[in-house]
Each structure stands twice: as structure tokens, then as C-alpha cells.
Image: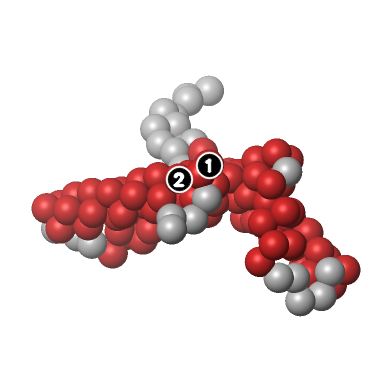
Amino acid sequence: MIRRPTGSAHRGLGEWLAQRLTALYMGGLGMVAVIYLLLVPAPDYLQWKGWLAGIAVRVAVSLFFASALVHAWVGLRSIYMDYLKPLWLRVTVTAVTLVILLALGLWTGHILLWGFPP
């Protein structure tokens, strides 16, 4: 029996899995938020602030935004690899996207740790 080299047979599995897991987490937390809004109609700023003061909610929201950033990175990166043919353009757009997503992640972390800026 002759075995063929598999080469890149498993390439992309990690990205596919990351995309699906982050989508599941974001969808699940989105449903929790909808249920919360149905149980506490028209929450005001103080209610939102009190809800986000709990460590469990803060961790869940942090994971939500981290999932959103990973989800965006994987999706945009695969789009760039498929449709941006010149290497210089693909590298440039990917680097700019990485910087923007990192800045958004740092900004989100700042808000979740220390609150909104005055």
C-alpha cells in the first residue's frame, strides 16, 4: 500500500475551531443578555453599572470581547488570504488589522478594568 503525504490536510482546523467556538460563546452570552433585558426592562445606567460590577459578569463580558476580537481576526485573515493576491498588500492590510484589533482589545480592557473615561 502506497501512502500519500497528507501535506496540509489539517491546516485551517484550528482557525475553523476558533471561529465556531467564539461564535457559540458570543451567541450564548447574547442570549443571556436578551433574557436579562426581558427580565429587567429599560435598565438605567446605575443598573447596568451594578450588573457589570460583579466579577462573574465582568469576566464573561471580557471573554465576550476577546472572543469577538479572535472571531474578527480569523475571519478577516482568511478573507485577506483568499482575495488579496499581491503579497505586499496582504501583509500591509493584515498588519493594519492586527494593530486596530489590538487597540480595540486594550481599549476594552481599560474600560472593563477602570470604567469609562471621564
Q: Residue furthest right?
A: 39
- Judged from this view, the residue extending furthest toward the front is 118
Is 86 or 50 nearer to us in this picture?
Answer: 50
Give the x, y percent position of residue 96. Answer: 23, 54
Give the residue displayed 58% in from the left and 45% down from the top. Answer: 62
Number of marks present in the image shown: 2
Q: Is residue 99 left or right of residue 20?
A: left
Residue toward you, 102 or 97: 102
Crowdedness of circle 1 by 10 Å Cα count: few (<14), some, many (20+)? few
- Tell me what residue is drawn at x 35 percent, y 46 percent: 102
Please, what secondary structure does the residue beneath circle 2 have? Answer: helix
Label 2, label 1: how far apart the Cα atoms are = 5 Å
Q: Is residue 2 visible?
A: yes
Amino acid type of the residue tagged 1 in the rendering? Leu
State the residue at coordinates (43%, 55%).
Answer: 117
Q: Give the position of the C terminus as an image quadrant.
A: bottom left
Which residue is tagged 1?
113
Residue 70 in sight here: no
Q: Are marks 2 and 1 in contact (CB under 8 Å)?
A: yes
Return the x and y of residue 44 as percentages of the image width and height. 71, 70
In the rendered structure, which amino acid carries the disc numbered 2? His
Give residue 110's mark.
2
Question: What coloring was used for the rendering?
Answer: secondary structure
- Local crowd size for mark 2, using a 10 Å CA cut-off: few (<14), some (14–19), many (≥20): few
Quarter residue 32 falls in: bottom right
Q: Residue at x 88, y 68 (%)?
A: 39
Query: What is the x, y in percent for residue 115?
Result: 52, 50
Q: Which mark is residue 88?
A: none
Near-viewer residue (31 or 36): 36
**Residue 111 appears at what percent x and percent y?**
49, 50
Q: Could you tell me which secondary element the residue under label 1 belongs to?
A: helix
